[in-house]
Amino acid sequence: MRGRYSLGWAHCANKGQTFRPTGGGNFSQITIDSESGNSLDFHTIMVDLSNGLGALRGNVVQGDFDAALKSYQVVRERFTMMELACTACHDEPREYFVDSRVKGRLLRIGGFLRKGSQDVDLYTQELNNINEVSCMPCHQVHMPAAFLQQYWESSKN
């Protein structure tokens, strides 16, 4: 039986190098150019993505679908940037955070917005799934490594 955290733990067990900052890329050195031409670092992309998802959910719950569409556009751009950021360390296609299942859910949210759907439950279901299938597994695997890298870098000073 697959548990709620099985993907993260399986990745940890089979890809231990993820937790060794010297074995992979350095999160603080990852930068991606946005559509507007600004270069954003990994941390900023993550914060923007998180804030965008929160704003999208909040806009939908408040019934402000014009603002929700603007939040969705930020999320789409940051999601694409995050997919590019993965290639800084990973050669193989990602099978969780930025895979086709998650992209499909994100596109469905865009479809709801374009069609003018005001069914909050439809949005909530897709946003919850993105959180469970995308955000959480990636954070379980990569946040310990990123924090460890940051600690090691700060302790050198």
Image (cartoon, rainbow, N blue to C red):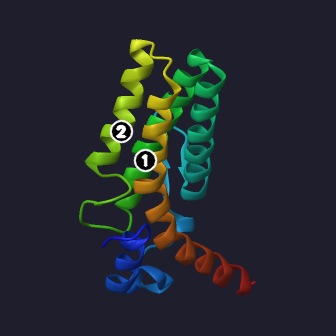
Q: In the structure shown, which secondary structural element does the residue marked by tag 1 occupy? A: helix
For residue 34, say whether it is visible: no
Direction top: furthest residue: 116
The residue nearer to you, when weighing 14 against 34, is: 14
* Quadrant in which residue 149 is drawn: bottom right
Q: Horizontally, is 59 left or right of 12 in the view? A: right
| Residue bearing mark 2 | 105
Residue 9, labelled with which disc?
none
The residue that appears at 32% across and 67% down in the rendered structure is: 90
Three-letter code, disc 1: Asn
Q: In the structure shown, which secondary structural element does the residue marked by tag 2 occupy? A: helix
Q: Dot 2 surroundings within 10 Å: few (below 14), some, or many (20 or more)?
A: some
The residue that appears at 48% across and 45% down in the rendered structure is: 128
Screen quadrant of the C terminus: bottom right
| Residue bearing mark 1 | 129
Question: Residue 2, how many percent across, how many down?
Answer: 33, 70
Question: Residue 11, how many percent across, how many down?
Answer: 36, 76
Q: Horizontally, is 31 left or right of 23 in the view? A: right
The residue that appears at 62% across and 27% down in the rendered structure is: 61
Question: Residue 12, how many percent across, how many down?
Answer: 40, 81
- How far is mark 2 from mark 1, CA to CA? 8 Å
In the rendered view, would you say 72 is above or below 47? above
In the rendered view, would you say 85 is above or below 15? above
Screen quadrant of the N terminus: bottom left
**Mark 2 touching mark 1, by CB under 8 A?**
yes
The number of discs equals 2
Mark 2 / mark 1, whichever is N-terminal: 2
The residue nearer to you, when weighing 123 against 56, is: 123
The residue that appears at 42% across and 79% down in the rendered structure is: 18
